[in-house]
Image: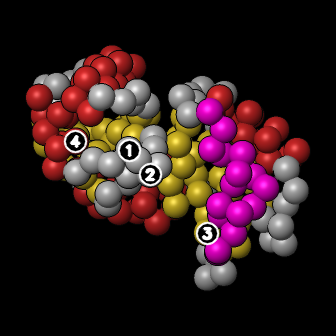
Amino acid sequence: MKYCAFLRGVNMKGTNMKMADVCQVFKDAGVTDVTSVLASGNIVFSSEKGAEQLKQLLEESMSAYFSYEAFLFIRSEEEVGLLQANIPFETDAGFHVYAFVGIEGVEKILMDEFSNATQGPGEEAEIVNSVFYWRVPKGNTLDSSFGKVLGKKNLKDKMTSRNINTFEKILKKMG
């Protein structure tokens, strides 16, 4: 089965790694057809193992090799396709749209945080099929009230986010 691992916090805040090294760690862990998409920690691979088993194996392998606490989230090719197909917002050149990949129930936590944050003009959030999507004006991602919430330590093992354009690139690599 084809999967994508979404690593959290890669090449940010001092956690720097070469994607070639990450791919090698995955290969050494026993998965096949390994390739990276962008430098933000998106690793496409094949395995007969289930997602939960892969999550534990790959987090342990990454933590041991890179000497950091690794958090990653595994999605099948079908799940990545649904992430891309269910985007609830119209394309608008003035906005970024992000989808969040994480543990079960994280979308509700994120919606609560979003509801408690101050929204800027045009900023929106929606949950579709247990996936949290966020639309934010370009240039405001990190400065928005909700954007600042995303760096909270209590969320680091629960989710990661990607711009929706990343999912399109991942699906091309998977296909």
Residue holding disc 3: 96
Q: Looking at the picture, which amino acid does disc 3 mark?
A: His
* Residue 118 placement (x, y as % from top left): 88, 56
Residues drawn in magenta: 138-153
Closer mark to the observer between disc 3 and disc 1: 1
Label 3 vs label 2: CA separation? 19 Å
Q: CA distance from mark 2 to mark 4?
A: 15 Å
Q: Nearer the viewer, residue 74 or 117?
A: 117
Residue carrying label 4: 22
Position of 21 with respect to 7 (left or right) is: left
Q: Amino acid at mark 4?
A: Val
- Marks 1 and 2, how far apart in space? 6 Å
The image quadrant that residue 144 belongs to is: bottom right
**Residue mark closest to the camera, 4 vs 3:** 4
* Category of crowding for the residue at label 3, using alpha-carbon neighbours closer than 10 angstroms: few (below 14), some (14–19), many (at least 20): some
Figure check: 47 above or below 80: above
Residues at marks 4 and 1, CA–CA distance in whole angstroms: 12 Å
Q: Earlier in the sequence, mark 2 or mark 4?
A: 2
Residue name at image x 63 percent, y 44 percent: 151
Disc assigned to residue 12: 2
Three-letter amino acid code at the position of disc 1: Thr
